[in-house]
Image (cartoon, rainbow, N blue to C red):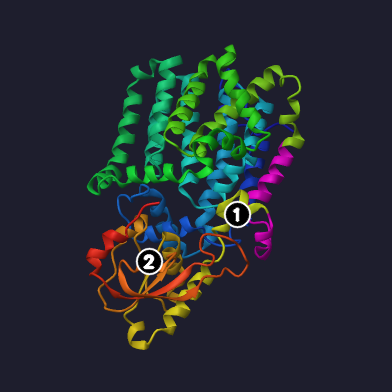
Amino acid sequence: MPEPAGPQEREPGVPPVVWRPVLAMAAVLGTVLLILSARYGYHRDELYFRAAGRHLDWGYPDQPALVPLVARAITGLFGDSLVLLRTPSALLTAAGVVLAALTARELGGGRRAQLLTAGAYAVCPFIVAVGHLFSTATFDVFASTALVWLVVRWTRIRDGWSPLAAGIVAAVALNVKYLVVFLAAALVAGLLISGPRDFLRRPATFTGAAVAVLAALPGLFWQARHGWPQLEMSDQIAAEADFGGRPGFLPFQLVLTGVVLSWLWIHGLWRLFRSPDLARVRFLGWTYLLLALVFLVTAGKPYYLAGLWAALWAAGAVEIERQGAPRGTGWAVSVPAYAITGITTVLTTLPVYPVDLLARTPQPYINADAAETVGWPRLVAEVARVHRSLPEDERSRAVIMTVNYGEAGAIDRYGPALGLPRAYSGHNGYRYFGHPPDTGGPVIFVGAESASGLLRFWTDVTVAGRVDNGVGLDNEEQGAAVWICRGPRAPWRELWPRLAHLS
């Protein structure tokens, strides 16, 4: 049966898009993500975005405004549905599979190359993991992949709309994360190094750049008005050394892209510099090397390069389709290799285990985000128990404060049904949501590790409870103390700046 026709298939000089199998892969991935979206619970970042959406601003210390705005729209229209909150992520991740195949097609890839590329994207551990969550990374990866595809497409057709479309995509990405600035700069540098360079003579290039800059201005003005907290946030990310820091930067790219299938993008990177057939897109190789160097020096996270993975998979797949896999490596791109990678990805990134067994599986150690989606209702229930234990005259004046935005977001999500007031936190964006009123009542403080830190702000602190997620899962909140603090040493307007922190 012939593939369904599409408008791009009539373009001369490029293979037809194999829509049916590509769309099938995208549909399977999207369906799996939607089916599993309501298992376990919110991630701490999702609780934060939900709260930030109720305090809309032009920016936040750790991100631009778009993702909280989307969260506000979803919860405002549909209420607090975890399935609907995560639906955009599932759809964007599925659409990324199609973009990956289209990127291979732009490089001259036929059926096999398109399927190898789309399949690598569909079973990539990092892609699937962020596709399960409503996160800035999910939006950023899709937008970055789309930006790279548009630039690759322009090098083939040299049209006027692709640079403008790239500027619009960059404008959206700049309101998700500022990381796209590095990608755009590296793409420009790669084009200047290896060509084609005539993009500098195209008015649409500067129109697209202007669109991106104008879209970023509100967030940049917010950052300037608040002392550029995003720069401090970047320093904190580097200091935390997630994914092994600089020593782990390159090895973790292999892990995040699926170990065995990482060979495909490595082969693609190599062939970008060696193959005459890929000379037109050699800039992709330079883009990757320049970005890798920048993020290695600045202690960035390995997934900051994820927007280029589809293009590198595509380069490797196109070369394999044309020349075959190098001797002894064909197994790395075989159907069993993809199947095993897909199964492993599901078992290590998605909520497929009964929650009471999760702690006994490898998943929390491989994918720490999984552990951060368990236990929030029980945390809030413990805070509510402590709140009810207060004398009635104190209970009406009590303030709830937390160490981090996940705890505060959980209380704001589940607390009203239990009679709790709103939560406050000095962590990241929560600092800008306002400080508590000077009610004269006690403070229920969640998450502080010791009394000594709290005694800098209150004269009397006692432990009144402990958080227990009920399934023995070792996450950041498990065993956290719930304190009652009395006797503030200063009014809130003086304590608040001292309680603020970024991480």
The residue under the point 63% across, 22% down is 318
Q: Residue 468 carries which label?
A: none
Q: Quadrant of residue 102?
A: top right
The secondary structure type at the circle numbered 2 is: helix
Q: Write down the residue under mark 2.
A: 452
| Residue 213 as seen in the image, left or right of residue 51 | left
Q: In this view, does 355 lie above or below 484?
A: above
Q: Is the magenta stretch mostly helix, strand or loop?
A: helix
Q: Write down the residue under mark 1.
A: 34
Q: Quadrant of residue 53?
A: bottom left
Residue 305: horizontal and vertical position, in percent?
A: 50, 34
Residue 370: horizontal and vertical position, in percent?
A: 58, 55
The residue lying toward the viewer, choosing from 133 and 360, is 360
- Label 2 CA crowd tier, 10 Å (few <14, some 14–19, many 20+): few
Q: Sequence-wise, which precedes: disc 1 or disc 2?
A: 1
Dot 2 amino acid type: Ser
Magenta part of the chain: 338-361
Residue 182: horizontal and vertical position, in percent?
A: 40, 32
- Label 1 CA crowd tier, 10 Å (few <14, some 14–19, many 20+): many
Look at the image and say whether residue 55 sits in the magenta stretch: no
Is any atom of residue 252 visible in this view?
Answer: yes
Dot 1 amino acid type: Leu
Distance of label 1 from label 2 (alpha carbons): 45 Å
| Residue 280 as seen in the image, left or right of residue 445 | right
